[in-house]
């Protein structure tokens, strides 16, 4: 993907010309701070080993996980998205699963998240994926108000099951 200025999607975005690009090697420190903010929001520890592992996935073209960074006018990353394809046997199709989406608090409300979601929608269309799907916390009201504007809330309930413990 060639870095190009994205179209503005909100009135606030007209003052901040956002660009959305895949992460580059020199983005590690900025990405790590954004990822740390995301982990902190969800109260999940972020040891350096986890950051390095996820970064290695994002920078490995053979790994399924891909990433995007939204950048402000000065090129500084202010938000991230991590996504991957997932098979949908019931539909005989492939979809896009958005694992992580985060915009730094100082950049919220200015259209950065709109640009990330618009780019994901474009990637899904270009790759023939038939849906972009994600989950969020029930109490993440600010994000949910945005998601309600751009996507359809499903009625599915999510479960997590731990793998069998090996002795």
Image (tube, rainbow, N blue to C red):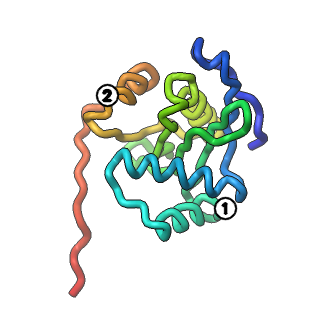
Per the image, label 1 sits on a secondary structure element best described as: loop
Query: Hey, which residue is sitting farthest bottom in the picture?
Result: 167
Q: Quadrant of the N terminus?
A: top right
Residue at x 59% of width, y 39% of height: 78
Of tags 1 and 2, the one toward the viewer is 2
Residue at x 63% of width, y 57% of height: 28
In the picture, measured across the screen, residue 1 lies left or right of residue 126, that is: right
Residue at x 56% of width, y 40% of height: 79
**In the depicted view, which residue is nearer to us: 98 or 74?**
74
Residue 8 x, y percent position in the rendering: 65, 19
Query: Hey, which residue is sitting farthest front in the picture?
Result: 106
**In the depicted view, which residue is nearer to us: 104 or 52?**
104
Per the image, label 2 sits on a secondary structure element best described as: helix
Residue 43 x, y percent position in the rendering: 32, 51
In the picture, measured across the screen, residue 30 lies left or right of residue 148, that is: right
- What number of labels is visible? 2
The image shows residue 145, relative to residue 163, as above or below, that is above
Mark 2 and mark 1 in contact (Cβ < 8 Å)? no
Residue 25 x, y percent position in the rendering: 71, 59
Query: Hey, which residue is sitting farthest top in the picture?
Result: 11
Count neighbours of disc 2 (C-alpha within 10 A) and say few if under 14, some if 14 to 19, many if 20 or more. few
The image shows residue 56, relative to residue 30, as above or below, that is below
Q: Quadrant of the C terminus?
A: bottom left
Q: Is residue 121 visible?
A: yes
In the picture, measured across the screen, residue 163 lies left or right of residue 111, that is: left
Q: Is residue 93 visible?
A: no
Q: What mark, if any, has residue 141 been given in the picture?
A: 2
Q: Residue at label 1?
A: 61
The image shows residue 45, relative to residue 92, as above or below, that is below
Of the image marks 1 and 2, the number of the one nearer the N terminus = 1
* C-alpha span from label 1 to label 2: 35 Å
Q: What mark, if any, has residue 8 been given in the picture?
A: none
């Amino acid at each position: 993907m060639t870095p190009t200025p994205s179209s503005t999607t909100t009135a606030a975005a007209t003052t901040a010309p956002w660009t959305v690009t895949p992460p580059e090697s020199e983005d590690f420190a900025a990405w790590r701070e954004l990822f740390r903010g995301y982990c902190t929001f969800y109260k999940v520890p972020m040891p350096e080993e986890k950051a390095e592992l996820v970064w290695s996935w994002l920078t490995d073209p053979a790994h399924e996980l891909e990433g995007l960074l939204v950048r402000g006018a000065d090129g500084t990353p202010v938000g991230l998205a991590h996504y991957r394809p997932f098979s949908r046997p019931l539909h005989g199709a492939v979809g896009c699963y958005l694992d992580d989406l985060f915009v730094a608090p100082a950049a919220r409300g200015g259209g950065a998240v709109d640009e990330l979601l618009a780019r994901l929608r474009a990637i899904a269309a270009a790759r023939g994926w038939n849906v972009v799907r994600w989950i969020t916390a029930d109490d993440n009201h600010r994000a949910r108000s945005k998601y309600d504007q751009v996507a359809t809330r499903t009625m599915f309930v999510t479960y997590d099951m731990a793998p069998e413990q090996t002795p």
